[in-house]
Image (cartoon, rainbow, N blue to C red):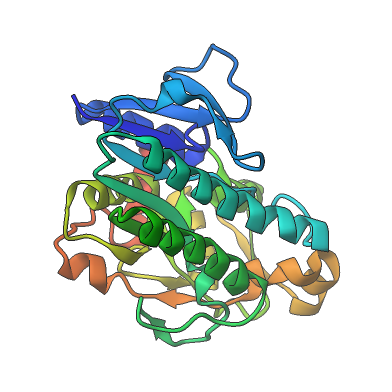
């Protein structure tokens, strides 16, 4: 039975991915900075900042996955917070590389989270993996993250795939949970003019994409982790209200107000990133949810 070691496995994506892997017949292990002993999967200590880990995690591991990183929206982007966001990603990546060097035999592949923040605010441009990075803190942070990945590839010779994740849809946490709060109060606010593009993905499709990238030997380099049909922010909120069957009052939250309240972090909601899924589709991946309304309806029904 193949074994997968996940950094950051206890988070929103990691928890659901672990379940998908288990259902597919894999054994799952987690790295955690603070293992308690009560986790649902064998969990081993690691310290990305210090570069240390519990070596008992490594024997028999076939694949590495890294989802670790400080939450991008968990606090204002002070200089200290920006450094933490970048360091948490680059340091955990480097540690995974160091683990791989210690393993005999070497793991078959290393699949890492990345983010569509790589592209930045690009208006209506349809963005592919061939496009250059944008400008601003989000592109800067993701470039540093991916540079750490390619350094591990050069150092170890591992096959590495980076999944540039978009807005992950789950009712158990993340952005969707926050966007649902006003809808349940019969309002559907939108930010700025509401025409900015939102590139989203159902959490189960994202988990399947990670497993697909892990299992297919030809998959290497960056891949956009988004559904094929991005939507504008105003349409997203209207569809959300429709699926949850809450009549909702539409109203704008001005861009100036968002920037005043959030500072530079306002680009998370005001930026427009229209991202293509064509590369993964052409490579043979099939989405279960390629349109927003059925994706949201499924999440409402299943509670995932």
The reply to whether residue 165 is visible in this rendering is: no
Left or right: residue 211 versus residue 129 is: left
Taking the spot 35% from the left edge, 79% from the top edge, the residue there is 128
User: Split into 4 quadrants, where in the image is the C terminus?
Assistant: top left
Q: Residue 131 appears at what percent x and percent y?
A: 40, 83
Q: Nearer the viewer, residue 28 or 46?
A: 46
Q: Nearer the viewer, residue 291 or 167?
A: 167
* 283 w.r.t. 130: above or below: above
Q: Residue 136 appears at what percent x and percent y?
A: 66, 78
Q: Residue 44 appears at what percent x and percent y?
A: 50, 23
Q: Nearer the viewer, residue 292 or 2?
A: 2
* 229 w.r.t. 11: above or below: below
Residue farthest along the top direction in this orientation: 38
Q: Residue 204 appears at what percent x and percent y?
A: 33, 44
Residue farthest along the left direction in this orientation: 284
The reply to whether residue 293 is visible in this rendering is: yes
* 33 w.r.t. 133: above or below: above
Q: Nearer the viewer, residue 255 or 207?
A: 207
How many callouts does the rendering have? 0
User: Split into 4 quadrants, where in the image is the N terminus?
Assistant: top left
Taking the spot 19% from the left edge, 46% from the top edge, the residue there is 215
Taking the spot 30% from the left edge, 69% from the top edge, the residue there is 277
Left or right: residue 54 versus residue 73 is: left
């Amino acid at each position: 039975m193949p074994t997968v070691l996940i950094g950051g496995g206890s988070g929103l994506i990691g928890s659901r991915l672990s379940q998908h892997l288990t259902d597919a017949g894999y054994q799952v292990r987690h790295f955690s900075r603070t293992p308690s002993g009560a986790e649902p999967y064998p969990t081993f200590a690691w310290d990305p900042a210090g570069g240390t880990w519990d070596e008992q995690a490594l024997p028999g591991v076939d694949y590495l996955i890294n989802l670790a990183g400080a939450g991008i929206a968990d606090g204002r982007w002070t200089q200290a917070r920006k450094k933490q966001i970048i360091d948490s990603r680059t340091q955990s990546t480097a540690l995974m590389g160091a683990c791989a060097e210690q393993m005999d035999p070497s793991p078959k592949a290393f699949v890492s989270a990345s983010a569509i923040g790589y592209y930045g605010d690009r208006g209506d441009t349809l963005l592919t993996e061939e496009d250059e990075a944008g400008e601003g803190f989000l592109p800067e942070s993701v470039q540093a993250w991916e540079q750490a990945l390619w350094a591990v590839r050069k150092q170890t010779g591992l096959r590495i795939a980076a999944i540039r994740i978009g807005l992950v849809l789950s009712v158990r946490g993340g952005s969707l949970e926050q966007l649902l709060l006003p809808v349940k109060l019969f309002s559907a606010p939108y930010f700025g003019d509401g025409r900015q593009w939102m590139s989203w993905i159902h959490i189960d499709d994202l988990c399947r994409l990670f497993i697909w990238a892990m299992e297919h030997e030809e998959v290497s380099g960056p891949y956009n982790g988004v559904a094929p049909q991005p939507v504008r922010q105003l349409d997203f909120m209207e569809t959300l209200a429709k699926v949850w069957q809450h009549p909702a009052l539409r109203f704008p939250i001005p861009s100036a107000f968002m920037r005043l309240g959030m500072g530079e972090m306002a680009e998370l909601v005001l930026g427009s990133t229209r991202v293509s899924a064509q590369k993964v589709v052409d490579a043979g991946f099939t989405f279960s949810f390629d349109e927003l309304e059925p994706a949201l309806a499924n999440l409402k029904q299943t509670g995932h």
